[in-house]
Structure formats: C-alpha cells, structure tokens
C-alpha cells in the first residue's frame, strides 16, 4: 500500500464504530445487601441462587420492534419463571422495580385491565429451566420502550395457576446504564 493511500485511509480507521442496535446485560446474581450494588439481585436464593448467571440481549434493529432474549444458568432446575419488563430499578425491596412497563400506560394502577395488561402491551416471556437450571427464552413486541422508562427485567416465582400468573418477585436485573 502506498503512503498517500494509507494516509487517506487512516481517518476512516479512526472513526468510532457505528452504535449497535442491540444491548447486552450480563451479570451474576447477588444478594441486594452486597457491598457493591449488584446489576442482578436475587430475592429468593432457593430459586435464583447467588452466583447464578443471566444474559439479556435486547435488539432494536428493526424500527418500532423490540426482540429480547434472556439466557440464564444456575437457577432452580425444572422451573418456570414468568419474566416481565418493569418501570423501576432494582433495589433491596423487590417492589422497587415498580409496575410492569406498558407501551400504552393504564391510567389506573396497579394495572389489571386486560385492555392494558396483555402480551401486546407488555413485554412478557416465560423462562423454563432444564434439569441443570439453565434456560433461554425470546420474545418480541411491536414497539420500543420509551427511553429511561424500562429500567429492569424481573423474574417472578410463578404459581400453580400457570406461567402468566406471576407470583412473587424472585430476581431483578438492572437494564438502565
């Protein structure tokens, strides 16, 4: 390569890469009382043991669409965890994650109206673990969360009523920067 050509290409090589339409959050679950505030909190060590691992990939490559993939290992084996996007951050109190994030917000809270509380208006998925406590789930919605309003992904205990009956909050993963 000639020196003038190399000099002409150098500014292109120094350009920052284009921002990816996907974001990745990867963390190990810790107790809420950890010395350093954890990115992933377990509220139920029997279902989400400390040290178990989570990876969340959120893809916004298609305008007006969100695809979220959750992969976890080390969780309770053979269990179904209903998972939802929430408006609040993770904290020592499981309730600090706030209500479910809704694309069109129900004016009456807590939201129980099926016009708002449904799989088209909320980001929902069910994580099913295998006999080793590993699992993966993906969901897609036809919208993108408003900036700064979808701050956490919460794993619920599940109930005998089925995977959409959430139950107690057993873990929280921080999504905001």
Image (cartoon, rainbow, N blue to C red):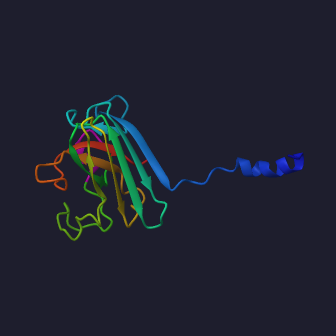
Region rendered in magenta: 91-98
| 58 or 76, nearer to the observer | 76
From this viewpoint, which residue is outermost toward the left?
160
Instruction: Name which residue lies at 71% across and 47% down.
Output: 14
Q: Quadrant of residue 164?
A: bottom left
Q: Is residue 102 magenta?
A: no
Q: Against 119, is 98 above or below?
A: above
Residue 24 x, y percent position in the rendering: 45, 46
Left or right? Give the position of 175 relative to 95: right
Q: Against 80, is 141 above or below?
A: below
Residue 61 x, y percent position in the rendering: 49, 60
Residue 6 x, y percent position in the rendering: 83, 47
Instruction: Name which residue lies at 46% across and 59% down.
Output: 60
Residue 153 x, y percent position in the rendering: 32, 49
Q: Quadrant of residue 165?
A: bottom left
| 88 or 67, nearer to the observer | 67
Left or right? Give the position of 3 relative to 80: right
| 140 or 90, nearer to the observer | 140
């Amino acid at each position: 390569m000639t020196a003038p050509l190399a000099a002409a290409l150098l500014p292109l090589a120094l350009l920052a890469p284009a921002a990816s339409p996907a974001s990745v959050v990867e963390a190990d679950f810790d107790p809420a009382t950890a010395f350093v505030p954890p990115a992933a909190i377990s509220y139920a060590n029997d279902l989400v043991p400390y040290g178990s691992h989570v990876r969340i990939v959120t893809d916004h490559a298609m305008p007006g669409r969100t695809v979220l993939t959750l992969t976890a290992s080390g969780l309770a084996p053979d269990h179904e965890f209903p998972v939802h996007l929430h408006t609040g951050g993770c904290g020592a109190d499981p309730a600090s994650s706030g209500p479910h994030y809704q694309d069109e917000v129900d004016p009456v809270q807590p939201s129980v109206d099926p016009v708002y509380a449904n799989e088209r208006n909320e980001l929902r998925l069910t994580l099913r673990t295998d006999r080793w406590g590993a699992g993966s789930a993906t969901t897609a919605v036809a919208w993108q969360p408003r900036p700064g309003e979808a701050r956490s992904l919460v794993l619920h205990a599940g109930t005998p009523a089925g995977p959409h009956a959430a139950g107690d909050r057993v873990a929280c993963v921080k999504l905001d920067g």
